[in-house]
Amino acid sequence: MSKKEVHVRKYRAFRDVAFSDEMEDFVRVANLFDALFQLIEACAATKAIHIQHHAEVARVLRGQADLFGDRTETVISGFTKIEREFRVGCEYGGSDGTKEWQQARPLFEKIEALALPTLGENR
């Protein structure tokens, strides 16, 4: 199995958990973050690039701007917002995740729609 396929499999698994109505909202937000990171890694793998750590996403994507083209900054800013605002509030703060889920979900779906064509997929 190629690295791309592994990342796609992980993206789908994390996404499935995030969109499960049985999960608490704070768990859903954490899984959105993980799904998005794996989706970006899968896209990077199409160019034999490995990001390795979520803190490197912006640096790597800016260095490989042809990966997402004019969508690069949108992908970076959305990922960063989910990572630093929504996920952190749920994992380290006192939030139950309801507000974060309501804000993170449409942002995730927007980035997902921008990234999936890189894999030759659509949602």
Image (spheres, grey):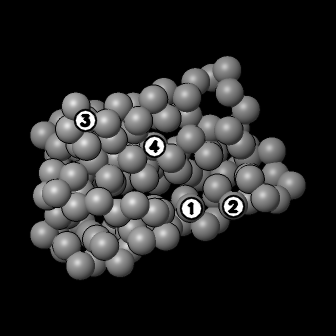
Q: Which mark is residue 35?
A: 4
The three-letter code of the residue at mark 1 reads: Glu
Which is nearer the eye, 56 or 74? 56
Identified at 63% across, 23% down, the residue is 21
Q: Residue 83 carries which label?
A: 1
Q: Is residue 122 visible?
A: no
Count of numbered badges drawn on the protein: 4
The three-letter code of the residue at mark 2 reads: Val
Give the CA separation, mark 1 to mark 3.
23 Å
Q: Is mark 4 on a helix, strand or loop?
A: helix
Q: What element carries label 2?
A: helix
Q: Dot 3 corresponds to which residue?
A: 5
Instruction: Residue at the far right: name it.
Output: 94
Give the CA separation, mark 4 to mark 3.
14 Å
Task: For marks 1 and 3, give the one nearer the viewer.
Answer: 3
Q: Dot 2 corresponds to which residue?
A: 88
Residue 67 percent location from the top left of the image? 17, 64
Q: How crowded is mark 1: few (under 14 residues within 10 Å), some or many (20 or more)?
A: many
- Asked if the residue at tag 3 contacts the one at tag 4, i.e. Cβ–Cβ closer than 8 Å, the answer is no
Q: Which of disc 2 and disc 1 is earlier in sequence?
A: 1
Q: Is mark 1 on a helix, strand or loop?
A: helix
